[in-house]
């Protein structure tokens, strides 16, 4: 059935309310994955996994305990001793094998990801393709590392720089890109010779469990372990465990603060990729149609549940009205619906009822503040946790909705009058993950990115990623880098060996 709201196309399918179709989903086993096989949890307590499109429970997984983490870490410690002694080629062969296995089973991963997160087909397909590319890139990158040349830097003493694994790495991944964010951590961590204990989000653990199910018996036992459960138990134990050398988290600022605080007690390293509120700075000379199309794509990809989403537009006051007209027209063409309602569906649901309610409250707060809903601004009737793609225009400087992370299909539009004001307002954000600049002026395209306090700045583009270049932020967005050779640096340590040959 196809229905029209005031502006959007909404697609519902029979599967949208049909629970009996769910058993066809290629679900993984529900246990923890430790030392190469699935094992039951220590308590038998379960966490339900909900399809946000249908609101139906599609699986249940173990509610892990600190004891479960201890068991997994013990296995990882033993496995790492052998794995860390392998050559880069041997590790690359394993990463390429993982990529091949995912590619051979991509339909299963896409189906699980869409069912567990509500992602449209195009988003799930892109996630799986990017996951495969991540493993292939890291397989090659692990064989191309360079360090300072050995030599005599002190008289009669030869120095050699060794790059070593850090040991066992605890990983905590988010719900918005379950498989891809797992790959962003697993691939470089294994490539550097470490072993892993990973806690996927309790809301979206299925694709990670499916991955290790397919890898069982095909990669060395114990190098990749999965413990499902909640952050306050499993995540807390990973952060405090004495045998874990580094904790890597992609998640909220609050989660990152908790991990960093706990990890500090044992002085373990921390790798944090946290929230974002990406400004999109549109100068008066920009191609306004292209900028609007860019925000349509990068602001509403994955229903805006992306830390790099183009969610905060700062447009010059002289072209603000024209730009907003283009943006509203672009956003009005988005198709909302269930993943199986058609290949043209672009916007899926919010991940969960609590998150759906948070996004609704942000929109209600904007209405109470008297802000203008240029398009959208409402929730859709269920089933499913759907929010209309929304553009809020004429947003004043400092408005709460323009400074805090909504993490939904909501874009705000503010104006500026001078270049200096644009830079100052963009940098006012507590986040520093990503930003974009839209201009035809070559001087601005070179100067402004240098002045913006964000880890990635695009010019005339937004949310374009590649494995060869780093991803990570500043300020409240955390520290550490995913992707690229910089990730391998983060997950390894250097050792200086100096030999006295003059004695």
Image (cartoon, helix red, strand yellow):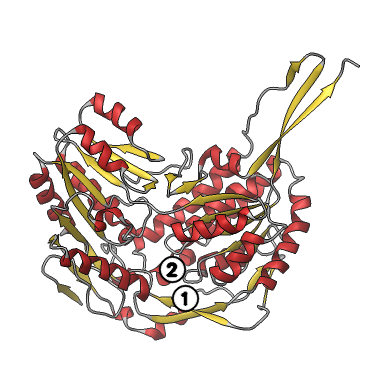
Question: Does residue 193 appear to the left or right of 176 in the view shown?
Answer: right
Q: Which of 243 and 6 is in front in this view?
A: 243
Quadrant in which the N terminus appears: bottom left
As drawn, 375 above or below 448 = below
Task: Tell me the tag on residue 163.
Answer: none
Question: Does residue 451 appear to the left or right of 96 in the view shown?
Answer: left
At horizontal 85% and vertical 21% (from top left) the residue drawn is: 500
Q: Helix, strand, or loop for circle 2?
A: helix
Q: Count residues near mark 2 (Cα–Cα under 10 Å), then give few for <14, some for 14-19, many for 20+.
A: many
Q: Helix, strand, or loop for circle 1?
A: loop
**Nearer-N-terminus badge (1/2):** 1
Residues tagged 1 and 2 counted as in contact (Cβ below 8 A): yes
At horizontal 71% and vertical 50% (from top left) the residue drawn is: 167
Q: Circle 2 is placed at which residue position?
A: 111
At horizontal 46% and vertical 69% (from top left) the residue drawn is: 112
At horizontal 27% and vertical 38% (from top left) the residue drawn is: 424
Q: Circle 1 is placed at which residue position?
A: 25
Q: Which of 237 and 118 is in front in this view?
A: 237
The part of the image, by quadrant, that contains residue 363 is bottom left
Q: Which residue lies furthest to the bottom in this view?
A: 20
Distance in Å between CA atoms under marks 1 and 2: 7 Å
Residue 427 at what x, y percent from top left? 31, 41
Instruction: Answer whether residue 87 is visible to the viewer in this image.
Output: yes
Residue 178 at what x, y percent from top left? 48, 62
Q: Nearer the viewer, residue 225 or 14?
A: 225
Q: Count residues near mark 1 (Cα–Cα under 10 Å), then give few for <14, some for 14-19, many for 20+.
A: few
As drawn, 338 above or below 316 = below
Residue 288 at what x, y percent from top left? 15, 41
Residue 403 at what x, y percent from top left? 29, 53
Question: Does residue 1 appear to the left or right of 357 in the view shown?
Answer: left
Quadrant in which the C terminus appears: top right
Instruction: Answer whether residue 340 is visible to the viewer in this image.
Output: no
């Amino acid at each position: 059935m196809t229905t029209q709201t005031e502006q959007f196309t909404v697609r519902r399918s029979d599967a949208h309310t049909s629970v009996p179709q769910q058993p066809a989903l290629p679900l993984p086993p529900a246990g923890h994955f430790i030392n190469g096989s699935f094992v039951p949890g220590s308590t038998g307590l379960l966490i339900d996994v909900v399809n946000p499109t249908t609101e139906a429970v599609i699986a249940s997984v173990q509610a892990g305990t600190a004891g479960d983490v201890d068991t997994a870490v013990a296995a990882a410690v033993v496995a790492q001793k052998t794995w860390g002694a392998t050559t880069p080629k041997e590790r690359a062969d394993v990463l390429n094998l993982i990529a091949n296995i995912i590619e051979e089973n991509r339909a299963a991963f896409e189906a699980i990801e869409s069912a567990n997160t509500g992602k449209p087909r195009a988003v799930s397909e892109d996630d799986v393709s990017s996951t495969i590319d991540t493993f292939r890139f890291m397989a090659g990158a692990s064989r191309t590392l360079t360090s300072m040349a050995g030599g005599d830097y002190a008289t009669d003493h030869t120095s050699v720089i060794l790059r070593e694994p850090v040991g066992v790495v605890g990983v905590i991944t988010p719900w918005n890109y379950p498989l891809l964010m797992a790959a962003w951590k697993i691939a470089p961590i294994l490539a550097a010779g470490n072993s892993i204990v990973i806690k996927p989000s309790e809301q979206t653990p299925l694709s990670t469990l499916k991955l290790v199910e397919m890898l069982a018996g095909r990669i060395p036992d114990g190098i990749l372990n999965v413990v499902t459960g909640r952050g306050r138990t499993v995540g807390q134990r990973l952060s405090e465990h004495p045998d874990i050398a580094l904790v890597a988290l992609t998640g909220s600022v609050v989660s990152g603060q908790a991990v960093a605080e706990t990890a500090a007690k044992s002085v373990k390293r921390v790798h944090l990729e946290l929230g974002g509120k990406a400004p999109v700075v549109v100068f008066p000379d920009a191609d306004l149609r292209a900028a609007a199309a860019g925000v349509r794509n990068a602001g509403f990809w994955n229903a805006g549940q992306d830390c790099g989403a183009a969610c905060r537009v700062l447009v010059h006051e002289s072209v603000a009205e024209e730009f907003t007209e283009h943006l509203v027209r672009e956003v009005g063409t988005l198709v909302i619906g269930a993943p199986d309602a058609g290949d043209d569906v672009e916007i899926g649901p919010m991940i969960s009822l609590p998150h759906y309610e948070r996004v609704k409250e942000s929109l209600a707060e904007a209405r109470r503040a008297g802000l203008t809903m240029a398009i959208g601004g409402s929730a859709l009737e269920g089933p499913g946790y759907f929010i209309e793609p929304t553009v809020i225009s004429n947003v004043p400087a400092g408005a709460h909705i323009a400074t805090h992370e909504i993490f939904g299909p909501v874009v705000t539009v503010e104006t500026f009058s001078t270049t200096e004001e644009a830079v100052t307002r963009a940098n006012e954000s507590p986040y520093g993950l990503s930003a974009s600049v839209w201009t035809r002026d070559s001087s601005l395209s070179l100067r402004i990115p240098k002045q913006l306090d964000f880890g990635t700045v695009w010019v005339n583009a937004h949310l374009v990623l590649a494995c060869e270049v780093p991803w990570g932020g500043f300020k409240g967005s955390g520290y550490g880098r995913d992707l690229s050779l910089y990730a391998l640096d983060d997950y390894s340590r250097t050792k200086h060996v100096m030999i006295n040959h003059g004695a």
